Amino acid sequence: MMVREVMLVFFFLLSFISASVVYDHRALVIDGKRRVLISGSIHYPRSTPDMWPELIQKSKDGGLDVIETYVFWNMHEPIQNQYNFKGRNDLVKFVKTVADAGLFVHLRIGPYACAEWNYGGFPLWLHFIPGIKFRTDNEPFKSQMQRFTKKIVDMMKQEELFASQGGPIILAQIENEYGNVEAPYGQAGKSYVNWSAAMATSLDTGVPWVMCQQMEAPDPIINTCNGFYCDQFTPNSDKKPKMWTENWTGWFLSFGGGIPYRPVEDIAFAVARFFQRGGTFQNYYMYHGGTNFGRSTGGPFIATSYDYDAPIDEYGFVRQPKWGHLKDLHKSIKLCEEALVATDPTYTSLGPNLEAHVYNTSSENCVAFLANVGTQSDATVSFNGNTYHLPAWSVSILPDCKNVVFNTAKINSQATRLEMRSLNPIPEHQTSKQIIDSFKTLQSDWSWVIEPVGISKSNAFTKFGLLEQINTTADVSDYLWYSIRIEIHGNEPFLLNGTQTVLHVESLGHVLHTFVNGKLAGSGFGNSGNSKVTLEKPIMLVLSNNTIDLLSSTVGLQNYGAFFDTWGAGITGPAKLKGKNFTLDLSSYQWTYQVGLKGEELGLSRDPSGSSSQWVSLSTLPKNQALIWYKTNFDAPGGTDPIAIDFTGMGKGEAWVNGQSIGRYWPTYISPQNGCVNFCNYRGAYSSSKCLKGCGEPSQKMYHVPRSWIQPSGNTLVLFEEIGGDPTQISFATRKTGSLCAHVSESHPPPVDTWELQPQTGKKLRPVLRLECPSPNEVISSIKFAGFGTPHGTCGNYGYSQCNSARAPAIVNQACMGLKSCAIEVSIEMFGDPCSGVTKSLAVEASCT
């Protein structure tokens, strides 16, 4: 180990020997030193423990100082007083893994999380405590909230994980975005906020507490901002620092919706504006989104993928250029740290929509941010006797008030095209051993169990009237059966022709299936904007006894809003049989209820081998049949690439690999045909619906299977199919990097890491295009495109224009082929000048093997 590395480790260890963490009006103060801190959210249950070290290391490599996470009460205490801190729920291990990487932790205890998580993170048993009212001045709730918060704090103290004990936790959060919903709670809400603050500070963590989106957070709690932009935010006291706890790097995906994405130029603009206007702590929500395994999704209708268009994608790959451009931004901000924490900025107008903010403590310590907040036109501004070009909706950072190190709209980072490569079906002409092995991953010997329609369990019960679902199931299952028997004589006034009538059912949501005498009569489902379902279907009854079975299904419980815990689901009516001039309302009749499925009671998903007598294996596999369990065995795809299952061909249900749920699948829920854009203009304010892709396609068809959950061979896949599908169509896919691309112009700043070299060389440094294969054993094996001049298009679709240097392909090939990485100066000295008087650029697409 080099001497410099030894010293870095030494200073890091010193930083975790009982650090003091306080704050003043400028910043968090750690061991007497104000700090500019870049943070990113990674939720430990949305990935697996074997993924944590690499995710955290990539976060550190991306320039983060802090990892932020919620604590998920319902994961840790699913049954009252019975705790789970194992596997993905091992909070202590996660915090220690962050510490091992040399990063700090912001622990958002809540214990309300929101987070598009089932029931906002609250355990369902909480709902059944007599007299309880959530998130208000209510003694039963406050007692439980204090008990759990104290348990988490005591766990952290026992492991000496707070900074005051020498650990990595420098911040804690109580409550979450309560200010957004506080008004309907009235005075009881205000009292609750004050109580929460006092309770948290009484726990004596030795680190500051924050409340996000809580303008009236009482001292000493720091109130913080969440949103796409927080540069306009001001703390509620001039003694508190300006902090941003959630900068949304994209948006969550809903079943039935398009896939949201947020251009990195806009994220960088928002971050630079925040630091330009006095901020010193900024957190990306999410930096790695991950996967909603099991039934953890909230919403309702939140998809299983929680990728969030984050800098590190769901599978653990860095998303380029987002990760790299933000890394350059972080380096640039860190060059300015000494000035940023020393004083408040001075504002100067440079013209309409043009601003300069300067942090100046001495002639040798001056930092400037120049911003063009206009959305239409680039501008040239004069500042300190020099002229600067500012693209629309961009910020330039000048660490010395003279030279630009970074502009938010000019991306130096490479882009990567990430691909899901399907392993099935296999083209006939490919016969290599690798492909033959991949063909064996999902075997064709499927077996199945038919899930009975209607009441099949011994614990069914009868009640008069229609019952709300959550109060009935306590969310132990997505499913609740409602069953009623009707005797028909043929002269009933609600009959139309013969024994035909119309069944009308109204449900609070989320999915409804109707069966008449064991046969499916109709289905309906809500959406993320309106979960309610109204189903009206003509049905044919028979003379004598008839059974009407209604299956209600939830797709994650509500996680946000005032009194969200009272919002309910399921069939609350009316349920009617409608004739021409007469309606029979069945709502108050006696119904029979069954919580959950027979297959759940039998443990078909948890222990398929233990229930082997239930499984049927015949030559003819039932397909496109509602309410059926499927099982097969498979071998793991070769290599180490992340794995997904493509559920094309299936309808809706849940999947388990070796007994662990990879989540709900629903590839038949198609996003709207309209609303997507081929090109997302980063200029102008972003919203969650501004930039969508995947219109007219399944919202999600690929589902992550963690490598740590499978063995090389002998794995079991179990599916519960709710609406009908063909399991022989599903296939494995692996996540891989396709092409590498970069597009850098003559007007781009030089690489950030050359900033300190500029005074030494005595000459102006040039922009550089860099490419690097992401995998350690790969080298650049082909150059698919290389153009210098005015090339057009995007990665995977570059094209030449009339202004083009014929020398570019040969220069790029010589510089890059056979190497893991390469760097090429972008200049006419390197490539010649194919067209004078025009700003030229270099675009390259390459591949690695």
Image: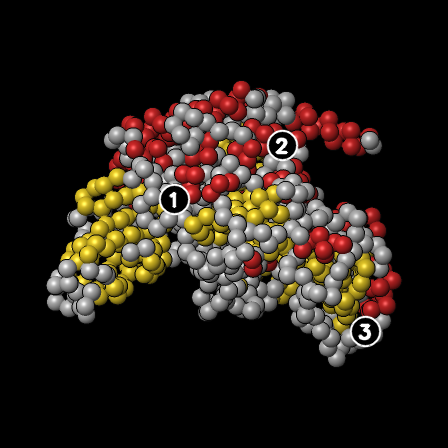
**Could you tell me how far apart the alpha carbons at marks 1 and 3 are, in whole angstroms?**
67 Å
Number of marks in picture: 3
Residue 7 sits in which quadrant? Answer: top right
- Residue type of the residue flagged with mark 1: Leu
**Could you tell me how far apart the alpha carbons at marks 1 and 2 are, in whole angstroms?**
39 Å
Element type at marker 3?
Answer: loop
Residue 351 seen in render:
no
**Mark in the foreground, 1 or 3:** 1
Residue 299 spot, x, y in % from top left: 40, 49
- Sequence-first disc among 3 and 2: 2
Residue that label 2 marks: 97
Q: Depth check: give the residue in front, 835 or 252.
A: 252
Position of 342 with respect to 810 (left or right) is: left
The numbered dot on residue 756 is none
Is the residue 631 above or below the residue 537 in the image? Answer: above
Q: Are marks 1 and 2 in contact (CB under 8 Å)?
A: no
Element type at marker 2?
Answer: helix
The numbered dot on residue 597 is 1
Q: Depth check: give the residue in front, 507 or 175.
A: 507
Which residue sits at x=54%, y=60%? 648
